[in-house]
Amino acid sequence: MPAQKRRTAAAGFFLFMIFSFGILSGQVKVIFDTDMGSDCDDAGALAVLHVLADGGEAEILACIYSSGKAVYGPGCIDAINTYYGRPDIPIGAYFGGDVGDSRDPFARTIAQDTATYRHDIIDRSQVPDLVEVYRRTLASQEDGSVVLVTVGHLKGLYDLLLSSPDSISPLSGLELAAIKCVKWVCMGGRYQGGGWASEWNFTGNGAGPYTKTVVDGWPKQSVFTGGEIGEGIITGKRLAQTPEGNPVRKAYQLFLGNLNNGRPSWDLTAVLCAVRGLGDYWVSQNVGSIRVDDQGRNKWEPDPDKAQEYLLPKASVQRMQNVLDSLMTSSPASTGFLEENPGESGLVPGTPRLEPNYPNPFNRGTVIRYTLEAPSEVSLTVCNVLGETVKTLVTKHHERGEWSVPWAGDHDSGSEAVSGIYFYQIRADGFAATRKMLLLR
Ligand SMILES: [Ca+2]
């Protein structure tokens, strides 16, 4: 089948899968607030968020560009959103000039290359003010439903919290945050040293004076992933295996000069925590609260105890690298590899019927069931999103009837498969059927 047709068939199939099997339930609704352009880990974090959305774990409500000294952040965000098949996510930008990084190692190049990335926003002149997007997005959501994640300076959030009632909502920004948000996950600060610490998102580029107001004034739970959490988790090398047209690959390549060494995963950890919580990746220190000074420096105090916590590592660095790298480098669902699968129609006599696996999502293992209407030579395999066979579960002659096969989330080699989307495909006498499943470690 021609590649284009295969992609089109795959896109339709993915949409069918998502809307047919209720994978959307349990989604975390996320607003992503970024200084896209200063460092490539913002691009990696947005990629992780899209892949989590592809897997039905998250919905991306809006992207906020909260750096005011470079203008191409929104264009770079739009290029990534478009690559992942979500070109219409609202984007808001900061238009002030007092907070932000004037360096632009990759955003401009990506934002201006609309021929390659097929997006339509180039710079911030094409998007609304971030306060408008924040307010509109929050006002449209159910109470207590939104997770806000910031991976840059806090000026955007500062402007939201200080915003007044307007035609969008009779609530102030502080009230909107208190009513609509369930929590805020923030990449910022440092916590494990014990004393006063200086971290770039909190203190850099003129952000310091705003950090204290936001950290002290945020009205709901806040979770901080400190600089030390992402620092040792080096990701991005696997981007070399993704298509040349991947803007996230381009961001890492331009920022680092090559794809040989990878980059710490500061912002990626915040996104993963926003969507999956602590999981078995982290534990949290939740007794005490943060003190922030006027320069944005911070320290953790055991008293008073507020609804604030910071992450401590639990899983190994190696495992976190695997989890984040495999998310960041997964193919977008909209450009998947799948072939047409006539078995999905269920109308052709002799077609194998493949049932939804259970449980799904799953952690330790899942069971795949299928029905044969006639004796057949059967193969049942599990593939990853790159189309590589992970595990061959069945290759044999089967009588007609109902069958079930467990998959323990392992490779043919016996090693553990990483978190992510997988596909299981049955082939029997020239027919094939494929379904999607989600492994969560
Ligand atoms: Ca950042």
Image (cartoon, rainbow, N blue to C red):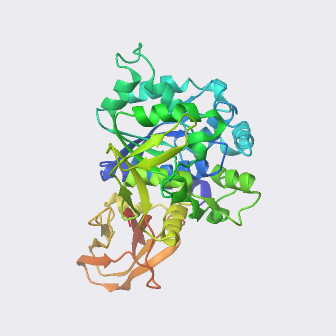
Q: Quadrant of the N terminus?
A: bottom right
Q: Residue at x 53, y 48 (%)?
A: 196
Outermost left residue: 401
Image vertical order of residue 319 relative to residue 251, above or below = below
53 or 32: nearer the eye?
Answer: 32
Outermost top residue: 167
Q: Quadrant of the C terminus?
A: bottom left
Q: How many marks?
A: 0
Image vertical order of residue 132 relative to residue 281, above or below = above
User: Residue 409, located in which quarter of the rendered image?
Assistant: bottom left
Outermost right residue: 257
22 or 147: nearer the eye?
Answer: 147
As drawn, is 138 to the left or to the right of 253?
left
Would residue 16 be seen by someone viewing this image from the given angle? no
Image vertical order of residue 45 relative to residue 353, above or below = above
Q: Position of residue 209 (x, y in %)?
A: 56, 31
292 or 157: nearer the eye?
Answer: 292
Q: Position of residue 43 (x, y in %)?
A: 60, 49
Q: Position of residue 415 (x, y in %)?
A: 45, 81
Taking the image in four quarters, ligand 1 sits in the one at top right
Q: Residue at x 43, y 69 (%)?
A: 315
As drawn, is 67 to the left or to the right of 25?
right
Would residue 249 be seen by someone viewing this image from the given angle? yes
User: Residue 343, located in which quarter of the rendered image?
Assistant: bottom left
Q: Position of residue 411 (x, y in %)?
A: 45, 79
As drawn, is 398 to the left or to the right of 39?
left
